[in-house]
Image: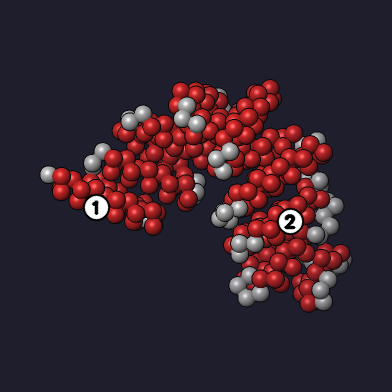
Amino acid sequence: GITREIHSATAAGSFANMMEVEVEHKESKGELLQKKLEDIRALEETDVEEAIKRYKAIIALVDEDGEIVAEKTAAIYALGELYAQKGRHQDLRNFIVDTRPFFSTIAKAKTAKILKELLNIFGRIPETEKLQAEFCKDTILWCEKEGRSFLKQRVQARLASLLLGMQQYKDALALINKLVKDVKKIDDKILLVEISIIESRIHLALKNVPKAKGSLTAARSAANAIYCPPSLQAEIDIQSGVLCSEEGDYKTAYSYFFEGFEGFDSSKNVVKAAQCLKYMLMVKIMTNQSADVYNLINTKVGVKYAGTEVAWLLCLKVLTAEKSMRAD
């Protein structure tokens, strides 16, 4: 059967040509590839290089009828994750560039979704902000060459966020200001929400709270006009909490951080949920509500997200209490 021939092709090093075998079979190409993907994931534990080779073979398969786009996409994500786990940032960058021919065979919206996820994967590798920024700039040029304005604007948004994180505030603000104008012309509300939040963060970094609040108001207005995904609404909430904290309104800030925490938790965004929990604890510490600090950490969600940062906050709470006792 075809399954045996696939295994033979793999052993013979001709895995990329396996789908050319014309054999009657009950299983679809997609179902067979799903099984192969499961096998490759298991192989990651024992032979990383062979796993990489096999993922690339699936991605390279000819798919004229678009029957295995989902499986090829799964292979792209899996290989990206594998590179990220191993800290192989340069290999990941080169791999994303090498994937561009595949992007020309699928819908532009699908390309934008895949590239966004790959950039998210890239972002999980520590201390790669500069490389990510360079990659974004290169991708923007590619988008211009290929006439992909939809994708270009999303990569520009990612670049602005990276520039903010690298404290290149002037460049970040110039980019985001132009992007806001461009996106308003095409009335892309989701992207407008995203870039308005980034704009608010840039203004806050520049200590311009009124403009930061204005940008956040724009984000809320755009979000109210559409269905706003929980994860994006949570981004609005966390920025709202930060601005309230900046103005000393800790009670309202806590409410926003809590809403943000629930949004990120439901979206399974562990990093962002943990960040919200940290902010919630910091607010309790700032307002001398020591009992609430321990109650929060001992809840089911507190235990779930407790880590080094939470432990650090507990130490801070103890030190604060000791300082207060010495002052008395």
Q: Residue beneath label 2, please?
A: 94
Which class describes the residues within 10 Å of circle 2: few (<14), some (14-19), or many (20+)? few
Colour scheme of this structure image? secondary structure
Question: Residue placed at 66% from the left, 74% from the top?
Answer: 47
Q: Is residue 207 left or right of residue 142?
A: left
Nearer to us: label 1 or label 2: 1
Quarter-wise, where is residue 137 in the image?
Answer: top right
Q: Report how far apart the C-alphas of labels 1 and 2 lie in the structure.
A: 48 Å
Question: Residue placed at 41% from the left, 31% from the top?
Answer: 243
Q: Residue 193, can we see it?
A: no
Q: Is residue 223 above or below residue 89?
A: above
Q: Where is the C terminus found, in terms of image quarters?
A: top left
Q: Secondary structure at mark 1?
A: helix
Image x and y of residue 271, in percent: 48, 50
Between 12 and 86, the one lying in front of the other is 86
Q: Is residue 146 above or below residue 92?
A: above
Between 165 and 249, the one lying in front of the other is 165
Q: Is residue 117 above or below residue 88?
A: above
Question: Residue placed at 82% from the left, 39% from the top?
Answer: 146
Question: Residue placed at 76% from the left, 59% from the top?
Answer: 59
Q: State the residue lying farthest toward the left.
A: 328
Which amino acid, by three-letter code, is at mark 1?
A: Val
Q: Residue 212, can we see it?
A: yes
Between 117 and 176, the one lying in front of the other is 176
Image x and y of residue 160, in percent: 61, 37
Image x and y of residue 57, in percent: 78, 64
Q: Residue beneath label 1, please?
A: 318
Q: Secondary structure at mark 2?
A: helix
